[in-house]
Image (cartoon, rainbow, N blue to C red):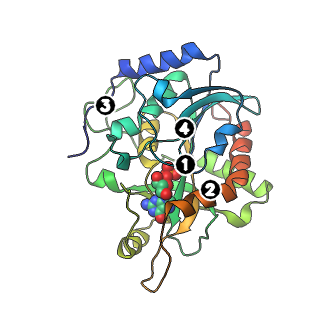
Amino acid sequence: MFPESHTGYSYEDCRATADWLLAQTAVRPLVGIVCGSGLGGLADMLKDQVVFNYRDIPNFPQSTVRGHAGQLVFGTLKGRPCVCMQGRFHLYEGYPIQKVTLPMRIFKLIGVETVILTNAAGGLNQDFKVGDIMIIKDHLNMPGFAGNNPLMGPNDERFGVRFPCMSDAYDRELQQLAMDVGTELGYGHFLREGVYCVLGGPSFETIAECRMLHKLGADAVGMSTVHEVIVARHCGMRVFALSLITNQAVMDYDSEEKANHEEVLETGKQRAEQLERLVSTMVTRIGHNNYS
Ligand SMILES: O=P(O)(O)O[C@@H]1C[C@H](O)[C@@H](CO)O1
Ligand SMILES: Nc1nc2[nH]cnc2c(=O)[nH]1
């Protein structure tokens, strides 16, 4: 079985965490950002910060992975109120999937309307290069195929419907906005779009697995994001996600390449500035409520 599966937090637990946060800060964020491995610098862009260590937030899990600081940062990004997870949770850390995705429900209950998720991923598409930024247009949920979906268990209609649609998971207007902003900033040569595949990790893929995932239609492979997207969509938030291609997935038995977390963090450092500018410019142009 999966760790403590079906022991999700109740609506009241989530409400209590959200109310605790709202009582400590006057910031009322409309945009929630999740920083991927090595991409925590996004949170440093926020002005007038109110910072919470995950260990101090009721019900919150702890970050255990290098490159995930473990702080929830409230503030403004070019005048727009935002909240940023500087560090996320992964299945391989041993957390049940409902705990991995808990912050999405907290986002919803504090008033977030749009979620921007980032991750580090291995490139399967042979046209991709290390340092490319891939706008996620769709996903393959491998743990979901095995029955590990964050919505397993009783459904609370106060969050969303029993059977949420996922064919529109990634907001098309926001994908277009990212393309437009990226092009304006001169990032066109490293901006891509594609399908992200999530696996449980923590081991990186074998050569045969990479070949299989590529044949199945995945352009990039990683260990996060999809679970958060499912929960965010279930409770009606608008979602945009991108992958930084931090390494090329090894597809060839003659290759000497070996995936490793150091390379992942290093590529994050090298692209941090552009990624931050892309996301912050997008945030200034996102409309709310009527999705203008
Ligand atoms: O949180 P993300 O998806 O960015 O982290 C990726 C997947 C693993 O946690 C780690 C592997 O280097 O990076
Ligand atoms: N599963 C997986 N996750 C990653 N995160 C960053 N690079 C990779 C990769 O190659 N595979």
Confirm or deny contact between disc 1 and disc 3 (CB under 8 A): no
Q: Earlier in the sequence, mark 2 or mark 4?
A: 4
Closer to the camera: disc 3 or disc 2? 2
- The local crowd at label 2, few if under 14, some if 14 to 19, many if 20 or more residues have their Cα within 10 Å, is many
Confirm or deny contact between disc 2 and disc 4 (CB under 8 A): no
Q: Is mark 1 within 8 Å of ligand 1?
A: yes
Question: On the image, numbered disc 2 is attached to which residue?
Answer: 268
What type is the residue that disc 2 sits on? Answer: Gly
User: Which residue sits at x=61%, y=31%?
Assistant: 73
Apparent side of residue 4 relative to residue 114 in the rendered image (left or right): left
Disc 2, SS:
helix
Q: Earlier in the sequence, mark 3 or mark 2?
A: 3
Compared with 287, 144 (above or below) is: below
What type is the residue that disc 3 sits on? Answer: Gly
**Does the image show residue 88?**
yes
Question: On the image, numbered disc 3 is attached to which residue?
Answer: 8
Apparent side of residue 180 relative to residue 56 in the rendered image (left or right): right
**Does the image show residue 134?**
no
Question: On the image, numbered disc 4 is attached to which residue?
Answer: 238
Confirm or deny contact between disc 1 and disc 2 (CB under 8 A): yes
Question: On the image, numbered disc 1 is attached to which residue?
Answer: 67
The quadrant where residue 95 appears: top left
Closer to the camera: disc 1 or disc 4? 1
Q: Earlier in the sequence, mark 1 or mark 2?
A: 1
Q: CA distance from mark 1 to mark 4?
A: 26 Å
User: Which residue sits at x=42%, y=16%?
Assistant: 16
Disc 3, SS:
loop
Image spot of residue 287 (x, y percent)? 68, 34
